[in-house]
Amino acid sequence: MYEETPRVELTPAAADLLRRLRATHGPLMFHQSGGCCDGSAPMCYPEGEFRTGDADVLLAELQVEGVAEPVTFWMSRSQYEVWSHTRLIVDVVEGRGSGFSLEAPEGVRFLTRSRVVGA
């Protein structure tokens, strides 16, 4: 099924950072944190390092120019029920987050912005 509005998108800054992280760490994935560690932030891990299961929803397979494989974006099913009416925009901001996300040593952190989409 074709979706006119993607559920998740990347800013150019987020795509640039993902290219750098991919070169260092290999294939990547996101899991949208539900409040643990760094508040509600997208946490970036090497693909498969964060274990997903039936309690998680795959929201997107993000194509990043210059990266061979898509970057998967997961969220817990219970959190998705609350956020299902939004488009998530993954951005990068200055400042180190307090979680375990791969970008932490870079002095920046991923941040999710959201926009309400029509039903």
Image (cartoon, rainbow, N blue to C red):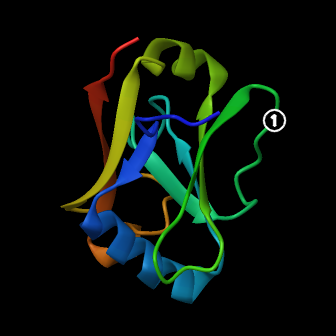
- The residue drawn where x is 26% and y is 29% is 115
Q: Is residue 13 above or below residue 79?
A: below
The image quadrant where one finds the C terminus is: top left
Quadrant for residue 8, please give it: top left
Nearest the viewer among 83 and 53 is 83
- The residue drawn where x is 46% and y is 77% is 65
Report if residue 98 is visible in the image.
no
Tell whether 30 sits left or right of 88: right
Mark 1 — residue?
53
Outermost bottom residue: 23
Instruction: Residue 118: give x, y in percent of width and height.
Output: 34, 15
Instruction: Residue 116: give x, y in percent of width and height.
Output: 29, 21
- The residue drawn where x is 55% and y is 79% is 67
Q: Is residue 4 above or below residue 47?
A: above
Three-letter residue code for mark 1:
Gly
User: For the image shown, how many numbered marks are present on the structure?
Assistant: 1
Quadrant for residue 81, please give it: top right
Report if residue 49 is visible in the image.
yes
Instruction: Residue 94: give x, y in percent of width and height.
Output: 17, 64
Tell me the element at label 1.
loop
